[in-house]
Image (cartoon, rainbow, N blue to C red):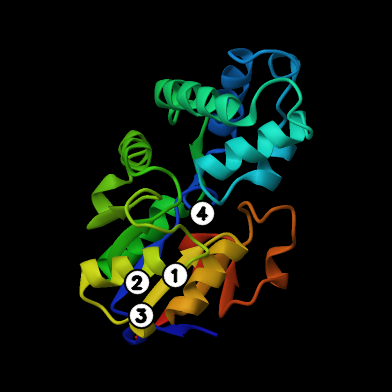
Amino acid sequence: MPWPLRQFDAAIVDLDGTLVDTLGDFVEALQRMLHDLPPPFSDFSVTPALVERMVGKGSENLIKSLLGHVDAAQSAINSVALYERAWARYQVHYQAINGAYSAVYPGALQGLQQWQAAGLRLVCVTNKPTAFARTLLQHKGLDGFFLHVVGGDAVARKKPDPMPLLHACSLLGTQPARTLMVGDSSNDAQAARAAGCPVLLVSYGYNHGEPIRSVDADAYTDALDTLRWAN
């Protein structure tokens, strides 16, 4: 069933897991980070499957989740000092490899082109730090589609809180009910529901290991360029 295009003035689009498959970037940066820490962290091998379950709620949560997974008792080192060291090294390593181990999903570029041509105003909202998000979009040739980029450090709270989406609507001057949220996880859906935005979820991203169609959403798609719109 085609969606009525006239229903929307704008779209908020998630980044990791929606536009770009960044799992390889996360794995590489986290592995390099662990190598800079004392045992048992330096001896741990990061896997894509593990990171996929942890990613989605911001870099801080990702790092804390991984450290806790490696050493649940935090017995190797003071937890605060450990986190601060890990965060500093992660920032260095992620900046160095940002985009190098990632790829734009099939249909993502074409989907953005279609939405832009249809007159939708686009903003990227991600839990990734804003500077990292801007760099990734630029490296992948996607930066020209977005009027704004709202990263996880742009407002006080991250998705699944609705604050980033409401901030994006304010920047665009649009009403949430006429602003489509496009994402890949329950974080995006929960934020959209709380903000009053309709929500579309892709089937191929990162949803903490849970089936995406178990998440409350208005629609689902296997590729962003296959959406059917009715004027």
Say if mark 2 contacts mark 3, CB within 8 Å: yes
User: Upstream in the sequence, badge 4 or badge 2?
Assistant: 4
Residue at figure coordinates x 34%, y 57% from the top left: 155
Amino acid bearing label 2? Leu
* Badge nearest the viewer, 2 or 3: 2
* Badge nearest the viewer, 4 or 1: 1
Above or below, 11 relative to 144: below
Mark 1 and mark 3: Cα distance apart in space: 10 Å
Corner quadrant of residue 172: bottom left
Mark 4 and mark 3: Cα distance apart in space: 20 Å
Residue at figure coordinates x 35%, y 80% from the top left: 176
Q: Which residue is mark 1?
A: 162
* Badge nearest the viewer, 4 or 2: 2
Q: Which residue is mark 4?
A: 18
- The label shown at residue 176 is 3
Residue 119 shows in this picture: no
Mark 4 and mark 1: Cα distance apart in space: 18 Å
Amino acid bearing label 3? Pro
Name the residue nearer the viewer: 37 or 214.
37
Classify mark 1: residues with Cα within 10 Å, few (<14), some (14-19) or many (20+): many
- The label shown at residue 166 is 2
Amino acid bearing label 4? Thr
